[in-house]
Amino acid sequence: VQLVESGGGLVQAGESLGLSCAASGITFSLYDMGWYRQAPQAPGKQRELVAVLTSGGSRNYADSVKGRFTISRDNAKNTVYLRMNSLKPEDSAVYYCNAHRAVSGIDHWGKGTLVTVSS
């Protein structure tokens, strides 16, 4: 199983950025797909859920990103996306892609992509 994130980088506050996560080795359409983040300066801190899009099409967002971030998926391309608008310095983190199979509790993780938002 591989989850490969892309699209991270350095942007200024107020700008937008899009992340992608390409999955392989799983039946993508059966998995809930999510984005989590962890601030680089807080390695001991638990990863924070940013957004999740279930296999059934339900979306949930962290309160801190509601109205600014949008999660979407393309089951034909085995890819999940995160569109991030109006970025803030506090959005700076390593963003991880997660694939969760609800019936078994199995989780798969990508290696992460760094997003840095300068003020």
Image (cartoon, rainbow, N blue to C red):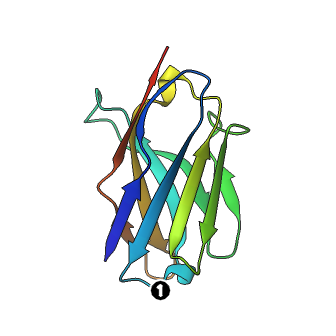
Please provide percent x and percent y for residue 95.
Answer: 41, 45
Please tell me in which quadrant of the rendered image residue 57 appears: bottom right
Rendered residue at 36%/46% (across/down)? 113
Please provide percent x and percent y for residue 112.
Answer: 33, 50
Please provide percent x and percent y for residue 108.
Answer: 35, 68
Q: Residue furthest left?
A: 43
Please give left or right for residue 47 compared with residue 90 in the image.
left
User: Total marks drawn?
Assistant: 1
Whether residue 43 is situated above or below residue 27 in the rendered picture: above
Tell me the amino acid under the disc marked 1. Answer: Thr
* Residue situated in front as seen by the camera: 78 or 60: 78
Rendered residue at 25%/35% (across/down)? 43
Please tell me in which quadrant of the rendered image residue 32 appears: bottom right
Badge 1: residue crowd in 10 Å (few <14, some 14–19, many ≥20): few
Looking at the rendered structure, the secondary structure element under dot 1 is loop
Q: Residue furthest right?
A: 67
Which quarter of the image is occupied by the N terminus? bottom left
Whether residue 13 is situated above or below residue 87 in the rendered picture: above
Whether residue 35 is situated above or below residue 21 in the rendered picture: above
Rendered residue at 40%/53% (across/down)? 6
Q: Which residue is mark 1?
A: 27
Please provide percent x and percent y for residue 34.
Answer: 52, 59
* Residue situated in front as seen by the camera: 72 or 47: 72
Q: Residue furthest bottom?
A: 27
Rendered residue at 53%/76% (across/down)? 77
Please give left or right for residue 27 compared with residue 59 in the image.
left
